[in-house]
Amino acid sequence: MAKKKDAHHGGAWKVAFADFMTAMMALFLVLWISAQDQEILIATSQYFQSPFNSPLDNTSGVLPFESNATPRGEDGKSSSNSPAAIDLDAMKALAREFYRLLNVSETDPNNSLQVEVTSDGLRVTLFNRSNQPLFQKDSSDFTEWGNMMMQNLAWLIDRQTFRVVVEGHTRADITSPRGDYSDWDLSTDQVQAVRRALTYYAVDSSRFDRLSGFGSTQPIPGEAPDSPRNQRIVMSLSMKSRPSDARDKSQGTGGSTGGVRPEPAPPVH
């Protein structure tokens, strides 16, 4: 009697092996992308949220293409100091993320927050509106909303290692129980309150480049001097380092300003 041949078991194992290899490749890509710079992570996230409107103009996929060619201006000369497109796109994505984090509509003209992308970072304007005040009336004491705003701003500044410039502006004819307390005093006190709060919530004091109180001398164009809209805090968040930072680091001082670090104030409840 002829020996019966073994039955053919098919190619099911090939399908299982292909699924396994696909899963391993996906895991490798996730781990690889997670190890990239923060700017690339933000841009990648934005790409998958809107794949048909990719923020990466210089790529054919989700990661930026790095060319060895030096960008050149209209005159044909090198323009290596101009910011890369992905940097601006990353800042735009970061601004949108900050709106989302605070549950504020970026298209509402009456909201209490305005975030603009600049050539070296972000410009954040916090309006002290009556419907959602940043400070208690004509004082430097934060409201609950203002305190939450400081916490989220501190997280943003610390995570992105921004340098900070804070400017305070008020409306004209503020009311105060103290006769010698003017709009200059109020704007200066509010700026110092912002610094103390951000320092309390993890922003190192050496990251502040300038604190300025302008009183009511710089109203918003088109607004009356006594308009409540003029009550605002303007923060310039820059990615650029001060020239002294690199010098201090090379000398082993860690970029310290050498001054006395101000004692942080507790949050206002």
Image (cartoon, grey):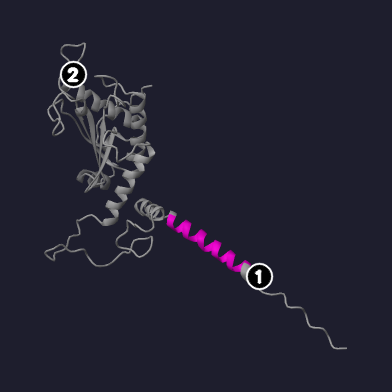
Q: Quick check: 228 above or below 162?
A: above
Q: Nearer the viewer, residue 135 or 257?
A: 135
- Residue 24 included in the magenta stretch of the image: yes
Label 2 sits on residue:
174
Question: Is residue 226 found left or right of 65 in the rendered image?
Answer: left
Q: Position of residue 57 (x, y in %)?
A: 29, 60
Q: Is the magenta stretch mostly helix, strand or loop?
A: helix
SS class of the residue under badge 2?
loop
SS class of the residue under badge 1?
helix
Label 1 sits on residue:
13
Q: Which residue is drawn at 19% across and 28% down?
A: 230
Badge count = 2
Q: Residue 54's image quarter?
A: bottom left
Q: Which of 252 and 35 is in front in this view?
A: 35
Q: What residue type is labelled 1?
A: Trp
Q: Which residue is drawn at 13% across and 64% down?
A: 77
- Kindly report the distance in space between the C-alpha atoms of the residues bearing marks 1 and 2: 79 Å
Dot 1 or dot 2: first in sequence order is: 1
Question: Can residue 1 be seen from the camera position used here?
Answer: yes
Q: Quick check: 66 above or below 187?
A: below
Question: Is residue 100 found left or right of 258 in the rendered image?
Answer: right
Q: Residue 2's image quarter?
A: bottom right
Q: Where is residue 11 in the image (x, y as percent from the top left)?
A: 66, 74
- The quadrant of the rendering that contains the C terminus is top left
Q: Residue 135's image quarter?
A: top left
Q: Where is residue 182 in the image (x, y as percent from the top left)?
A: 16, 18
- Name the residue at the bottom extreme: 1
Dot 1 surroundings within 10 Å: few (below 14), some, or many (20 or more)? Answer: few
Q: What residue type is labelled 2?
A: Ile
What is the span of residues highlighted in magenta in the rendered image? Answer: 16-33
